[in-house]
Amino acid sequence: MLTGTCHCGDVRWALDSKPESVTACSCTICRRYGALWAYGHIDHDIQVSGPSKAYRRKDGGAIDFYFCPRCGCLTHYIATGPGEDGKRWTGVNLRMLEPDAIADLPIDHFDGLDTWDDLPRDGRTVRDMWF
Ligand SMILES: [Zn+2]
């Protein structure tokens, strides 16, 4: 299990298992947040606790971004509605982890700005972005 917390410790999430990669997305929100994502479903393989606030983009959007109202860290996002399986798609911001936990994971670059496609892996790992 991996457990991430915001800087002040009020908001925390737990991910059942270590992901095989992390995702960096170039969309208008993710590039501002600088988030590195891993995915799952809230209350299934992802648990979140603590008081958070949500941000939803003005033009709608299918997910709410959650942040700590005290220290401002973006901790996770949750789909605004369930998928066909009844679960709500969730992303956790892996930057809330201690670096060693994920330093060796490869980065998947997702072009959320233009093509909505995964770009080919370029060999970079979290260590290359983070240290
Ligand atoms: Zn906090």
Image (spheres, rainbow, N blue to C red):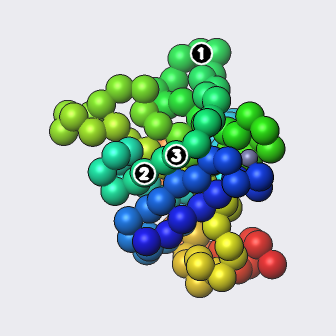
Residue at screen point 77% across, 52% down: 8
Residue at the extreme top? 59
Alpha carbon distance from label 3 to label 1: 28 Å
Helix, strand or loop at mark 1: loop
Helix, strand or loop at mark 2: strand
Label pair 2/3, CB-CB below 8 angstroms: yes
Q: Which residue is mark 2?
A: 47
Left or right of 87 on screen, residue 100:
right
Q: Which residue is mark 3?
A: 49
Residue at screen point 69% across, 76% down: 99
Say which quadrant the N terminus sits in: bottom left
Q: In the image, residue 54 lies at what x, y percent?
A: 61, 28
> Which quadrant of the view contains residue 27?
top right
Label pair 2/1, CB-CB below 8 angstroms: no
Residue at screen point 27% across, 39% down: 87
- Crowding near pointer 2: few (<14 within 10 Å), some, many (20+)? some
